[in-house]
Amino acid sequence: MTLDSTTLFTREYQLQTMMGPSCLRILDELLARVDLPPGARVLDLGCGMGLTSMALAKGYGCTVTAADLWIPAEDNARRFAEAGLADRVTAVHCEARALPFEPESFDAVVSIDAWHYFAADSAYLSAHLLPLLRPGGFLVVGIPGLRRPFERIPDDLRPYWVDGMNFCTLSWWRELWLQCTGLTVRHAFDMRCHEQAWNEWLESDNEHAKTDVVMMDMEGGRYFATHGLIGEKLAW
């Protein structure tokens, strides 16, 4: 399905609610490769202020559970109600390694600009996430990462580097997913929307965006990429 989710919200609203490179651009490019069933039950993992959650409900017709650790669930619930989506998007406050959901609750798990915080080990998928997907369900992830591996952090990037961010290459993530029994990797690619998604984020008044303006000007396209990974849970 091809959709431009940015048309669902005003530009001002997007700038107020995005928490990183345009999650809507990333979401649309990912879902152009996925055939979600009508009314799909989707877990939006690390949903931030719920922009992707609302797009999944409003644009893609999904029933969404919007889960985040940093943003209070009551704040997201208010946003969803104001958008007329209270009956289709449920806000949940939880930690990614303590997800309070029943097995096979979801047709898809979507995670945009959050996966690198909690999923950079081989056990995460099998222990915490795959049990929540129905057989044949999709895992759809957009991750900020690196064009190529570093032997050491470049000196000009070091002032902006935060330990624990797990910025890795596409091949690193793909190999990690291939270690997971029960998951087939359908797509692993560097996303075309990378530059546009970052440029839109840098227009925001968010304090982190203001810092990122300097970082991205210095980076000049040498280091960063946005990776797309799509997996499917085996039906056995």
Image (cartoon, rainbow, N blue to C red):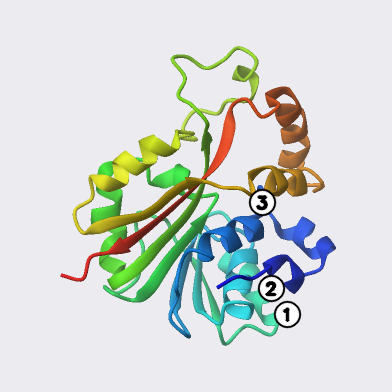
- For this orientation, the residue located farthest to the top is 155
What quarter of the picture does the N terminus occupy?
A: bottom right
Among the two numbered marks 1 and 3 on one chain, the one whose residue lies closer to the N terminus: 3
Q: Please say whether residue 207 is visible from this viewpoint.
A: yes
Disc 3 crowd rating (10 Å Cα; few below 14, some 14-19, many 20+) is many
Question: Quick one: 115 or 60, which is closer to the camera?
Answer: 60
Circle on res. 17: none
Indicate the amino acid at tag 3.
Met
The x and y percentages for residue 3 are 64, 71
Give residue 136's quadrant in the image.
bottom left
Query: What residue do we see at 15% from left, 70% from top?
Result: 236
**Of helix, strand and loop, which one carries label 1?**
helix
What residue is pinned by disc 3? 19
First of labels 2, 3 by sequence position: 3
Pick whichever, 32 or 142, lies toward us. Answer: 32
Residue 187, position in %: x, y?
A: 40, 53
Q: Quadrant of residue 134?
A: bottom left
Q: Are marks 2 and 3 in contact (CB under 8 Å)?
A: no
The residue singled out by tag 1 in the image is 82
* Residue to which mark 2 is pinned: 79
Q: Is residue 50 visible?
A: no
Q: Amino acid at mark 1?
A: Glu
